[in-house]
Image (spheres, rainbow, N blue to C red):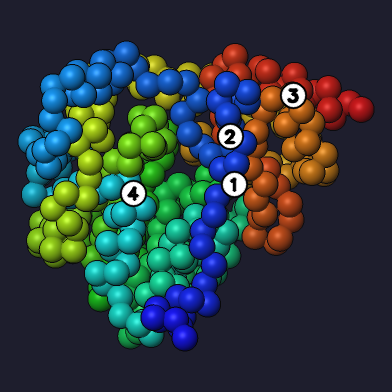
């Protein structure tokens, strides 16, 4: 007899395939991480903090909320810092839903949404993304009822990179005024798409963002929520006073004070590397989902063989399935040099 709730003991843990991910051995194109190290300024800020002899003190977040608000173009009382965007997703779902409530999570998508929803014993509806239709807006709208408490609008979606339009998010907020519209903008710096202009108009919109992907500090776990000021106190009541570690704040501050390094990286990925990879795949008549993010869901004829060939060449990619269950590989787009290496391996593999 477990001391934990029966629906939780029946669940499986979310276990991403972390084993063997050695950046010294492989080019890591499997987790949508930044593929180059962080800037000198971030490293130096962390070193300086360690030498300041403050590790024995509780975190003091200073003006990080003001810095982020300035970066985002919102008011500081419309923002809550979190321990990565996963934390923001969890706070939003836990804070808005009770056991037995209904949530709408279009699929395929990031596993954490459903993981948290199952932990809260929620009823999950999963209309399907399609390659041509994108976000299943009409199917989502048809599922909304008086029990709906949360709708996920990943913008863009993982694993397929599909965006959802500003107008579609507004439509969801209007159609489900009693439900939280969880807009996950994890890849905002790549896509440039955001619903932030809606948070002053709609109290039911909650936007989550992270410093894990573009800014390159997933190991430190730093993220934030953008939402109406009226929601902030509720989120802070659930978030612990020290849930975000000081090292994460130090790194995020340094990143915001020196954005050029990251901006240059984003430009290379989105303006050079990604078009190059897309052009290669199109020339080879290899199917892939249109993406506004730093990754592509590619549907090779022999995904297993391609994955193995890339592995043997020192490149890791992530197996994922599309909405029909067809095997695919989610490929993170790296630097131009890394992309050329990837294409060379693919060219050799596909010609055999």
**Circle nearer the N terminus (1, 3):** 1
Across and down, in percent, residue 4 comes to 40, 78
Picture coordinates of residue 236, whole percent (x, y)? 14, 58
Give the numbered dot on residue 85.
4
Q: Which of marks 2 and 4 is nearer the N terminus?
A: 2
Q: Dot 2: few (<14), some (14–19), or many (≥20) neighbours within 10 Å?
A: few
Say what secondary structure mark 3 lies in: loop
Q: Do the residues labelled 2 and 4 touch (CB within 8 Å)?
A: no
Tell me the quarter of the picture where residue 61 sits: top left
- Cβ–Cβ below 8 Å for labels 2 and 1? yes
Residue designated by label 3: 313
Instruction: State whether residue 205 appears in this view.
Output: yes
* Kind of element beneath mark 2: loop
Q: Which of marks 1 and 3 is in front?
A: 1
Q: Residues within 10 Å of mark 4 (few under 14, many from 20)?
A: many
Residue plotted at (33% across, 41% down): 221
Q: Helix, strand, or loop for circle 4?
A: helix
- Residue position marked by numbered label 1 in the rendering: 17
- Residue 264 or 177: which is nearer the viewer? 264
Q: Distance between the residues labelled 2 and 3?
A: 14 Å
CA separation in Å, label 4 and label 1: 19 Å
How many numbered badges does the structure rendering display?
Answer: 4
- On screen, residue 60 versus residue 319, left or right, reads left
Q: In this view, does 52 lie above or below 177?
A: above
Q: Quadrant of residue 209?
A: top left
Q: Is residue 229 above or below residue 277?
A: below
Badges 1 and 3: C-beta atoms under 8 Å apart?
Answer: no
Q: Residue at x 73, y 52 (%)?
A: 327
Q: Label for residue 21?
A: 2
207 vs 332, left or right, is left
């Amino acid at each position: 007899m477990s001391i934990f709730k029966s629906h939780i003991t029946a669940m499986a843990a979310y276990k991403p395939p972390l084993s063997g991910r050695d950046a010294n051995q492989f080019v890591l194109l499997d987790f949508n991480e930044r593929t180059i190290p962080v800037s000198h300024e971030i490293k130096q800020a962390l070193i300086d903090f360690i030498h300041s002899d403050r590790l024995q003190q509780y975190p003091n977040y200073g003006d990080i909320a003001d810095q982020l608000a300035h970066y985002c173009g919102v008011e500081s009382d419309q923002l809550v810092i979190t321990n990565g965007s996963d934390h923001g997703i969890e706070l939003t779902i836990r804070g808005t839903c009770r056991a037995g409530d209904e949530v709408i999570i279009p699929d395929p998508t990031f596993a954490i949404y459903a993981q948290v929803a199952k932990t809260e014993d929620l009823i999950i509806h999963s209309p399907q993304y399609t390659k041509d239709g994108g976000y299943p807006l009409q199917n989502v709208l048809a599922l909304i009822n008086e029990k709906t408490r949360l709708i996920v609008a990943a913008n863009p979606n993982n694993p397929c990179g599909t965006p959802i339009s500003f107008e579609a998010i507004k439509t969801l907020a209007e159609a489900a005024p009693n439900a939280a519209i969880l807009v996950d903008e994890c890849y905002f710096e790549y896509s440039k798409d955001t619903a932030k202009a809606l948070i002053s108009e709609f109290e039911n919109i909650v936007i989550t963002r992270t410093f894990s992907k573009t800014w390159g500090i997933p190991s430190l776990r730093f993220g934030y929520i953008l939402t109406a000021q009226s929601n902030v106190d509720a989120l802070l009541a659930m978030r612990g006073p020290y849930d975000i570690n000081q090292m994460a704040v130090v790194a995020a501050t340094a990143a915001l004070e020196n954005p050029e390094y990251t901006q240059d990286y984003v430009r290379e990925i989105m303006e050079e590397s990604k078009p190059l990879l897309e052009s290669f795949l199109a020339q080879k008549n290899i199917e892939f989902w249109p993406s506004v993010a730093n990754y592509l869901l590619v549907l090779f004829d022999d995904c297993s063989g391609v994955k193995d060939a890339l592995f043997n060449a020192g490149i890791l990619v992530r197996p994922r399935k599309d909405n029909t269950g067809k095997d695919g590989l989610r490929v993170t787009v790296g630097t131009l040099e890394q992309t050329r290496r990837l294409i060379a391996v693919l060219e050799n593999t596909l010609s055999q």
